[in-house]
Each structure stands twice: as structure tokens, then as C-alpha cells.
Image (cartoon, rainbow, N blue to C red):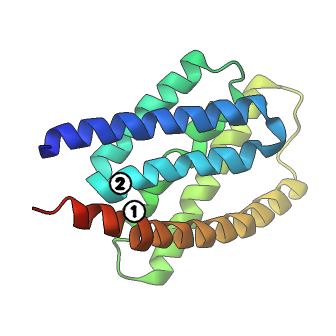
Amino acid sequence: MNKKTRTITLSALLSALTVVSLYIASVWPTGQFGLVAFASLFVAAAVIEMRVASGFSVFLVSSALGMLILPNKAAPLLFILFFGYYPIIKSLIESIGNLIIQWILKLVVFNASLTIIWFFIRWLVPDFGEFTPGVMIIYLGGSLVFALFDYGFTKVIWLYINRISKYTNERNRP
């Protein structure tokens, strides 16, 4: 199979798996965050297997399909506002050699996303509340949970690279 056909096929498959995960998240609200985070693994697989551009296309296609066909828009919105593009950003940030700069940039991305989500919720629900010191606790707690998420996400990506991608790429070599 030539490289272009493989890229298109794998991108379509990963997009479909992402939409299925988002569908399950939209009909099973108790596992919504976990399933949306799980859906982001397919974007990460696209970045690992075919580079950032394919990961971006999987993100865009999955986001558009999720918003068009899913009954509950909360899961695709959560995917669009943070989890979907984070594997792409993570890949770009981790190409920087300095670990401290990596973490600063990751936290800036997370807090910027949280701020956008905050304003989006305020736009949808005008009586949601003001930006108070209690909200700063949400930012601090969210940053801690994000750091744990990033650590776990890194471990799952490592597992994918060393257990799945390693063997599929060895079989595809001429």
C-alpha cells in the first residue's frame, strides 16, 4: 500500500474511532470526561503514525462530525475546546528540549483553554457567576489534575509507541 493511501485510510479509521468514542461519551454522561480523553488518543495515534498534519485532520474531521451527528453536543464541545487538539500541541511542545519550558507552555495552554471554556459557559449561561477568588481554586486544582492527566497521557503514548506502533511499523517495512 502506498504512503498516501495508508495515510488517508488510517486517518479515516482514527476519525471514525474518535467519533464512536465521542458518541459513547454523549450517551453515557457519567464517563464523559474519561471517554473524551480516550478519544484524544486517536488523535495522538495519528500524530505518531503520520505526523502533525494528519493528527490535525483527524481532529478537524472528528470535531465536525461530532457536532453534526451526535445527539448531545457536550462531548464534542469538550473535545473541540481542549482534548482534541491537545495531543497535537503536546507533540509540538515536547519537541522543545527544555523540560521546564515544556511544562510552562503546557500549563499556559491548559489555563488558556480553561479561560475560553469559562467565557463560553458565561456566554451560554449569563448568570453563571463572576470571576472570584474561588475560581482561582478551580484554576489551581484544574492545573494539578491536568498535570496528572498529562503524565498519564504520556505513559499511554509511550505504551502505544513501544507496544503497538513498534510492531505495526516493523511489519510494514519493505
Q: Residue at x 63, y 41 (%)?
A: 116
Under tag 2, what secondary structure? helix
- Rendering quarter of residue 119: top right
Q: Nearer the viewer, residue 57 or 160?
A: 160
Q: Which residue is mark 2?
A: 47
Q: Is residue 33 left or right of residue 138?
A: left
Marking on residue 91: 1
The disc labelled 2 sits on which kind of residue? Val
Q: Residue at x 72, y 30 (%)?
A: 26
Marking on residue 16: none
Instruction: Check contact, mark 1 vs mark 2: CB within 8 A.
Output: yes
Q: Nearer the viewer, residue 166 or 94?
A: 166
Q: Residue at x 15, y 40 (%)?
A: 4
Examine the rendering and report whether any part of residue 69 can be seen.
Answer: yes
The disc labelled 1 sits on which kind of residue? Ser
Nearer the N terminus, badge 1 or badge 2?
A: 2
Picture coordinates of residue 69 (x, y %)?
58, 17
Task: Look at the image and tell me in which quarter the C terminus lies.
Answer: bottom left
- Rendering quarter of residue 166: bottom left
Examine the rendering and report whether any part of residue 51 can be seen.
Answer: no
Q: Is residue 13 above or below residue 149?
A: above
Under tag 1, what secondary structure? helix
Q: Nearer the viewer, residue 154 or 118?
A: 154
Q: Residue at x 36, y 64 (%)?
A: 165
Picture coordinates of residue 19 (x, y %)?
54, 32
For the residues labelled 1 and 2, the Cα–Cα distance comes to: 8 Å
